[in-house]
Amino acid sequence: MIARDDLDHYRDFGFIRPQPLLTAGEAARCREACERSCIGAGRKPSRRQAAGRTKPYLLFPWAAELVRHPKLLDMVEAVIGPDILVFHTTVWIKEGGSGSLVPWHQDGTYFGLEPLEQVTAWVALTESTREMGCLRFLPGSHRDGQVQHRDHDDETLMLSRGQTIQRGVDEGSAVYLEFAPGEVSFHHTMAMHSSGPNRSARRRIGIGISYIPAHVRHVSPVRLSASLVRGRDRYGHFDPEPRPAPGGEEAAAATHADSLDRFWCASECIPEMQGIH
Ligand SMILES: O=C(O)CCC(=O)C(=O)O
């Protein structure tokens, strides 16, 4: 599913360029469902994102299906092996003309996972071009390990704390990834990346799904939850998460709230992580 050259590129540079994943019909249906569930009034904001834009696979059947898409899991398996959990997911929506942006960061910064084998699959539900603020990477930066971040109280920064790599970044060496709807890229938990504002008139939507192999554990005393989506979990490092069922909205909302509470608590109180922010 993923060519040997692309896997070598991931090892050497920390990311895999966009690959075809969803058919045009699947991407359109997913976009429509995502817009219906994640945009609009009445969504309680949580950490700079509407709450339903974080771990939406616990709330919405369309998202539960997307994170389990067989073709996507075949690709993830090629990167991290056969026993796969979903640890986290964020829906990234940039409205046309919006100044919101994602500062330079490493995904693993507040995840507290060991070993550093988490991979993010970024699935485009719309086109994502340079003008629209597409993803960009510093090739090879995953080899630098965890670097220091600083939190920023700036609402245009879309990350939960505005966390930004503290040292200077050579933007001139960044590689930009442009996507057609339905394509997916992959990046390593330590790959340094960012994305700019959406200067087009069109909405840009991507979903960042964080997968881990079952042997990866979380370092905090707070026990987190995660969803086994392929293979076996012989380790039990995470509490299993129920899949949302039609008609089970109330139960799903409770599961989602509990999972996020634990996640935010862990990301704030892990002693091992104090050194990086
Ligand atoms: O969607 C974006 O612009 C940024 C996404 C991102 O940082 C991520 O998925 O790790």
Image: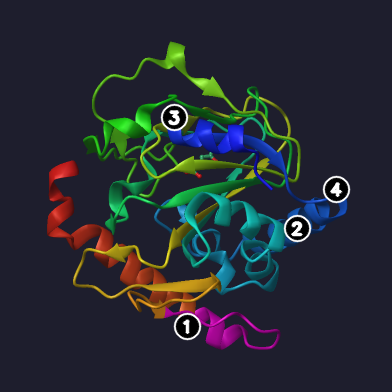
Tell me which residue sits at (43%, 62%) in the image: 213
Q: What residue is disc 4 on? A: 24
Circle 4 SS class: helix
**Earlier sequence position, callout 1 versus callout 4:** 4
Q: Position of residue 185 (x, y in %)?
A: 60, 40
Q: Look at the image and give the residue range highlighted in magenta.
A: 240-254
**Earlier sequence position, callout 1 versus callout 3:** 3
- Distance from disc 3 to disc 2, alpha carbons, whole Å, reads 32 Å
Q: Is residue 36 above or below residue 162?
A: below
Q: What residue is disc 2 on? A: 30
Mark sitting on residue 12? 3
Label 2 packing within 10 angstroms: few (<14), some (14-19), many (20+): many
**Earlier sequence position, callout 3 versus callout 2:** 3
Residue 204, located in which quarter of the rendered image?
Answer: top right
Q: Position of residue 242 (x, y in %)?
A: 53, 83
**Earlier sequence position, callout 4 versus callout 2:** 4
Q: What residue is disc 1 on? A: 254
